[in-house]
Amino acid sequence: MLRIYSVILEVVREMRPHLEAIERRDADLARQMRRALTSVPLNVAEGSYSRGKNRGARYQTAAGSMQETLACLETAGALGYIKPVEVALVEKSKRVIGTLVKNMR
């Protein structure tokens, strides 16, 4: 399992309040964000026990899902559903993406 996995779970925990706030205003956006957010640790776990191109594909999916989660937050902010997200959480999410991209190769 990648060491970044524990950081991914931290991100999931820290995103939960934002997800709940979005859900109160837009159930569809919250559903999409929840699917993207849960996809990250699940694909990393699957990729950790895959081989060859399958491993890279799982990490690529996880990275895309993390980026989609950030896009959901940005969209919710633009619509006025939530206040701007903490910079530290965004940076932690980008660190996850960077690590996954490095491990795709």
Image (tube, rainbow, N blue to C red):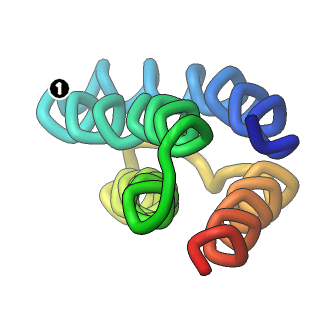
Nearest the viewer among 55 and 22 is 55
Q: Quadrant of the C terminus?
A: bottom right
Quick check: 90 above or below 6?
below
Nearest the viewer among 2 and 80 is 2
Relative to residue 41, is residue 11 drawn left or right?
right
Residue 93 is situated, as x and y percent measured from the top left of the image, at 69, 56
Amino acid type, residue under disc 1 in the picture: Ala
For disc 1, the marked residue is 27
Q: Quadrant of the N terminus?
A: top right
Query: Can you name the residue that lies furthest to the front here?
Result: 52
- Residue occupying image coordinates x 80% and y 55%: 92
Q: Estimate how packed mark 1 is, as few (under 14), some (14 to 19) or many (20 or more) residues with alpha carbons within 10 Å.
A: some
Residue 98 is situated, as x and y percent measured from the top left of the image, at 72, 73
- Residue occupying image coordinates x 35% and y 61%: 75
Quick check: 43 above or below 73?
above
Residue 97 is situated, as x and y percent measured from the top left of the image, at 64, 66
Question: Quarter of the image holding residue 26?
Answer: top left
- Residue occupying image coordinates x 56% and y 31%: 45
Relative to residue 8, is residue 33 drawn left or right?
left
